Every structure is written in structure tokens, then in C-alpha cells.
Amino acid sequence: MTVYGARLSNSFQGEWELYVVTDGISLEWPEQSFGRSGPVPTVQERADALAQLGFILMDGAEWKWQELPAGVMDRVRLLASVNVRRKGGAS
């Protein structure tokens, strides 16, 4: 079973988006925009978005958050990551 990394980020435009890092080039990664800058998508919204993309969380996986500051007066970008697999266990 192949493990992939899912990422949730508030993009430079400020809207929340989720994408799954796969073997393809970055322009081909499955992605889902939440179309809003706030609030942060709930755990269930993230799970639903992953399911629409054909992925589910790995057993016991938890979202890990990190802050990506640009400068002391700039808006902070947030990035969350979690391990996922394809639905049905296919690679």
C-alpha cells in the first residue's frame, strides 16, 4: 500500500486548499479548494474533500500543523499535513 501526504494550506490568496502529493508532477496533484479564507476547514470537511479526491486517512493518522511566517508584519501561512492512502487500498 502506498502512503501519500495530504496538505491543507491557506494559499497566498488566503483561501484554504487541500492537495495530495502523489508521484505526478505538482501540476497534476489532486486538489480541492474550500473557496473561503475562514474558518479553517473542519476535520470532517477535510475528510470529505479527501474522499472526493479518492483518498482516506491512514489508520491512526492525525493532522500536524506548522506555521510558515514570511516576515514579522506579514500574514502567517498555515500548513497541515497527514498521511493518506487511496480508497480501497489500491496504490
Image: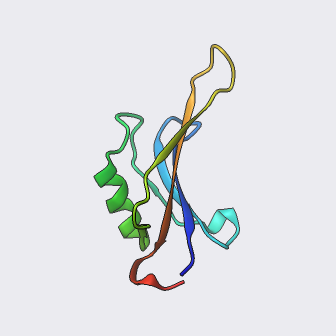
Q: Position of residue 4 (x, y in %)?
A: 56, 67
In the picture, the quarter occupied by the C terminus is bottom right
Residue 35 location (% of width, % of height): 40, 45
What residue is shown at x 32% (from left), y 45% (from top)? 42
Can you say whether 27 is above or below 42 in the image? below
Q: Which residue shows up at 40% across the image and 64% down it? A: 50
Colour setup of the view: rainbow
Q: Residue at x 32, y 61 (%)?
A: 48
* Image coords of residue 41 (percent x, y): 35, 44
**Left or right, residue 85 beside residue 29:** left
Number of numbered discs: 0
Q: Is residue 44 left or right of residue 6?
A: left
Residue 71: quarter of image: top right
Query: Farthest front residue?
Result: 60
Q: Farthest top residue?
A: 73
Q: Position of residue 5 (x, y in %)?
A: 56, 61
Using the rendered view, name the quadrant where residue 25 is placed.
bottom right
Q: Nearer the viewer, residue 70 or 5?
A: 5
State the residue in front, 60 or 44: 60
Q: Is residue 74 above or below residue 50?
A: above
Q: Is residue 51 left or right of residue 6?
A: left
